[in-house]
């Protein structure tokens, strides 16, 4: 049986995060990383730090190295268990770049240029200074995914279009050559797919936000975090009610509150009936601090033991390569690359 048809004992999941900041933000945690920890129970999980994606925009080498460790420590602190999940660094598995090239060769130039994230970022940076890597980023992402033939890819809403391209490319390859790739599905939990900026609740929470007050960095001093929640923009009126259109600020805070406390939004609305925004935000600040404080302690402790992080990442890369290398052998064969014959075999 060829390796692509090998049955998987448990269906796989795969996701990645870019090491582009010192700390993940609450959107990354609730939109993505928290699901990773939850899904590892029922799936065979692969999670990686997308350091090759992180250099598609100008970067600092020293910071990238440090942030790679920080990302790894935060995944473990969030409950991703290195015994159960393969946690690895993208550049430790060269098959990602190798398959990335093949994906680039089956993608149309216009198709790549139409990606929303590319359009937005190139508009910001300027078409003249934008890198070719930023254009081909979704093809590398497709390779990241398809190598492992996962059933689900847990990500936030902003990655949906890249997932659709990945499916198109998988289908195109399967059709043009031979059925090789499984079509992965995005796994986007509705309630937390898009956590919004606390100061501008019509934009998603993002590290490139215009004001740091809108962003909850999970590793920030919990006192600073509490203050940001208490100063979050609220809407006119005084009723704590979930209404995305009329009250985007309160709706966002209700989502965060519900996700972190496990209390349904309707129950929270009842709990705060007749109370004002001030009480609500004060309580939410406590809920957030209760989450970030132990998270931060665990991350900082892990960062003190680099040798252990190196061991985790080495073990993860070994697990990942075992799968990725097999897929790439099939792909190379199907596109017609002559297999290398070692001189000793001749
Ligand atoms: P990034 O930091 O861009 O590598 O994103 C890591 C993960 O977090 C991806 O799955 C994103 O879709 C997700 N994510 C980023 N921002 C948000 C947000 N504001 N709300 C929900 N998920 C998000
Ligand atoms: N593009 C993703 C982001 O910015 C990170 C990423 C790279 C990824 N490769 C991936 C996510 C593969 C899921 C699967 O968040």
Image (cartoon, rainbow, N blue to C red):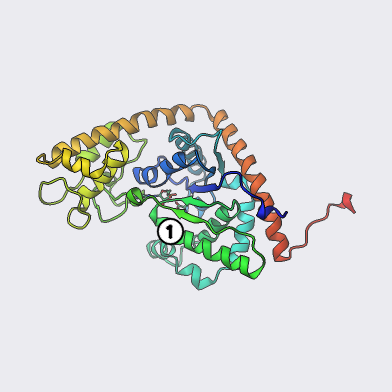
Q: Which residue is disc 1 drawn over?
A: 160
Q: Residue at x 15, y 51 (%)?
A: 235
The residue nearer to you, when weighing 143 against 257, is 257
* Percent x, y of residue 133: 53, 60
Residue in the picture at 36% in, 38% down: 218
- What quarter of the picture does the N terminus occupy? bottom right
| Camera-nearest residue between 85 and 106 | 85
> Which SS class for mark 1?
helix
Residue 283 lies in what quarter of the image? top left
* Towards the viewer: 188 or 209: 188
Task: Work out whether residue 132 can be spotted.
Answer: no
Q: Residues within 10 Å of mark 1 (few under 14, many from 20)?
A: some
| Quadrant of the image occupied by residue 258 | top left
Q: Is mark 1 within 8 Å of ligand 1?
A: no
User: In this view of the protein, which residue sits in the foreground, 311 or 58?
Assistant: 311
Please state the total of marks drawn on the protein image: 1
Lateral position of residue 25 relative to residue 271, left or right: right
Q: What residue is rendered at 28% in x and 43% in y?
A: 256
Residue at the location (38% across, 65% down)?
123
Q: x, y (%) of residue 164?
A: 47, 62
Q: Which residue lies furthest to the right in this view?
A: 346
Asked if residue 117 shows in the view, the reply is yes
Lateral position of residue 292 relative to residue 60, left or right = left
Query: x and y percent of residue 346 in the render?
Result: 90, 54
Question: Vertical placement of 163 versus 313: above or below?
Answer: below
Residue 14 at what x, y percent from top left? 52, 48
Figure check: 174 above or below 24: below
């Amino acid at each position: 049986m060829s390796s692509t048809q090998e049955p998987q004992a448990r269906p796989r999941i795969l996701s990645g995060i870019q090491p582009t900041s010192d700390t993940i933000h609450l959107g990354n945690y609730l939109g993505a990383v928290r699901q990773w920890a939850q899904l590892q129970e029922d799936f065979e999980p692969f999670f990686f730090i997308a350091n090759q994606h992180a250099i598609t925009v100008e970067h600092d080498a020293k910071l990238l190295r440090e942030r790679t460790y920080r990302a790894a420590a935060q995944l473990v602190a969030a409950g991703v268990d290195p015994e159960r999940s393969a946690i690895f660094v993208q550049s430790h598995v060269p098959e990602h770049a190798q398959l990335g090239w093949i994906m680039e060769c089956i993608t149309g130039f216009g198709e790549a240029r139409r990606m929303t994230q590319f359009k937005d970022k190139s508009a910001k940076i300027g078409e003249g200074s934008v890198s070719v890597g930023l254009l081909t980023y979704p093809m590398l992402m497709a390779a990241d995914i398809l190598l492992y033939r996962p059933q689900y890819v847990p990500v936030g809403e902003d990655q949906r279009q890249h997932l659709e391209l990945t499916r198109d490319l998988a289908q195109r390859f399967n059709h043009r050559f031979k059925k090789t790739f499984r079509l992965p599905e995005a796994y986007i939990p509705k309630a937390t797919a898009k956590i919004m900026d606390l100061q501008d609740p019509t934009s998603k929470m993002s590290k490139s936000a215009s004001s740091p007050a809108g962003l909850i960095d999970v590793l920030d001093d919990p006192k600073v975090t509490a203050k940001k929640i208490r100063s979050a923009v609220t809407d006119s009126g005084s009723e704590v009610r979930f209404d995305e259109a009329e009250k985007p600020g309160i709706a966002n805070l209700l989502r965060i509150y519900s996700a972190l406390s496990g209390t349904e939004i309707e129950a929270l609305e009842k709990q705060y009936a007749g109370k004002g925004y001030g009480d609500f935000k004060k309580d939410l600040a406590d809920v957030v601090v209760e989450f970030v404080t132990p998270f931060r302690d665990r991350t900082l402790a892990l960062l003190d033991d680099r040798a252990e992080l190196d061991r985790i990442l080495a073990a993860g890369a070994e697990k990942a390569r075992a799968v990725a290398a097999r897929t790439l052998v099939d792909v190379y064969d199907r596109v017609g690359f002559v297999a290398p014959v070692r001189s000793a075999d001749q």
